[in-house]
Amino acid sequence: MPKQIPLLPDLTDATLTARLQHLIDHKTKPLGSLGKLESLALRLGQILGTEAPQLQAPQMLVCAGDHGLAARGVSAFPSDVTWQMVENFLAGGAAVSVLARQHGLALTVVDCGVARDIAPREAALGQAAPGRPRLLLRKVAAGTQDASCGPAMSMAQCETAIQNGIDVVRSLPGNALLLGEMGIGNTSVASLLLARLAGLPIAECTGAGTGLDAAGIARKCAVLQQALDANVGATKPLDALAALGGFEVATLVGTVLQAAAERRVIVVDGFITSAAVLVASRLQPTVLQRCVFAHRSGERAHGLMLEQMEAEPLLDLGLRLGEGSGAALAWPLLQSACAILREMASFEAAGVSEQTAA
């Protein structure tokens, strides 16, 4: 692991947790009646270390890269869609672009390893304002190698991508980071990392991705098994990431580790961003204390991945788009949880009688 990564402290603070729980329990409502919003408020207070959490300058970070495995027919779409969607993000026409504008999220798109060169934008040196996406060029290489024949990337490339993620987060303001991604073939990467790190059969970890039929899924499984066999010795988290991962996933691992070190709220999107968090958590388990999992994806193996991290997602809408779309959709819930904690009156302050019987 790059030496720049500090060990993450354990955020467990029994005193703060007790104070937060007391505040939540004594708001003007029946005990527990706000359901998951109460546990979310507790989590946000714990992450930010305060009884009055405020989310500031939220950043939506979409990391993009291409995959050598895509040439093996593991996706219903051609690799060209990766760069085309990056352009769509920047033009404001993608789902995540629309949702970022709607919710006031600064959108930054990172070319981590797109096969085609993306033209730099004049605004590259400035901070991304809501509604005006920013492009960062952090290309390690023009796509990974075909993991079914050997390692997707060298360890040096993997560490460069991780460091790029660290540096990107250091350059961003705010205390909340929403994770997004783009890369044709990257559901295959997520499936491979889940299978290897969790010791699960690849068939249980593989789904339709961008829309494969049953025959396509069977073909995808066969290719992914070849990748596992070709990289049988890559069992440690970083080794597995280098052998089976992608440049955008490795960059996301760096962003997660750095955001956790800075005690930012990390809003995890779907299957692919969860794979990056899975790797990061195997490197430093306390990463998970800083994470809010936005949703359970329609990609069938996402539930297994969430179980590996004992994660409880906020939403279950059958989403399987990626991009950070689910994280953006969940964002208002985080805002509401903070507002409830800060602004909702207690029984005592409002002069309202508390519950007297069970």
Image (tube, rainbow, N blue to C red):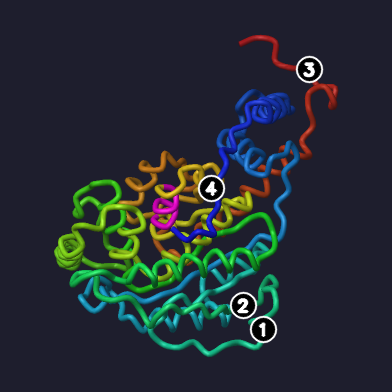
Badge 4: few (under 14), some or many (20 or more) residues near its Cα, within 10 Å? few
| Residue designated by label 1 | 123
Which residue is rendered at x = 56% and y = 37% of the image?
36
Q: Earlier in the sequence, mark 1 or mark 4?
A: 4
| Residue designated by label 2 | 134
Foreground pick, 194 / 319:
194
Give the CA separation, mark 2 to mark 1: 6 Å
Q: Which residues are magenta?
A: 275-281
Which amino acid is tagged 2? Arg
Determine if the magenta segment contains residue 326: no
Determine if the magenta segment contains residue 277: yes
Q: Nearer the viewer, mark 4 or mark 2?
A: 4
Q: Position of residue 110 (x, y in %)?
A: 52, 74
Q: Which mark is residue 353?
A: 3
Label 2, secondary structure: give it: strand
Q: In the image, is 137 to the left or to the right of 224?
A: right
Which residue is rendered at x = 54% and y = 59% of the image?
4
Which amino acid is tagged 3? Ser
Q: Nearer the viewer, mark 2 or mark 3?
A: 2
Q: Position of residue 18 (x, y in %)?
A: 66, 25
Q: Would you place residue 112 above or below residue 26 in this image?
A: below
Q: Earlier in the sequence, mark 2 or mark 3?
A: 2
Foreground pick, 116 / 231:
231
Q: In the image, is 71 to the left or to the right of 49?
A: left
Label 1, secondary structure: give it: helix
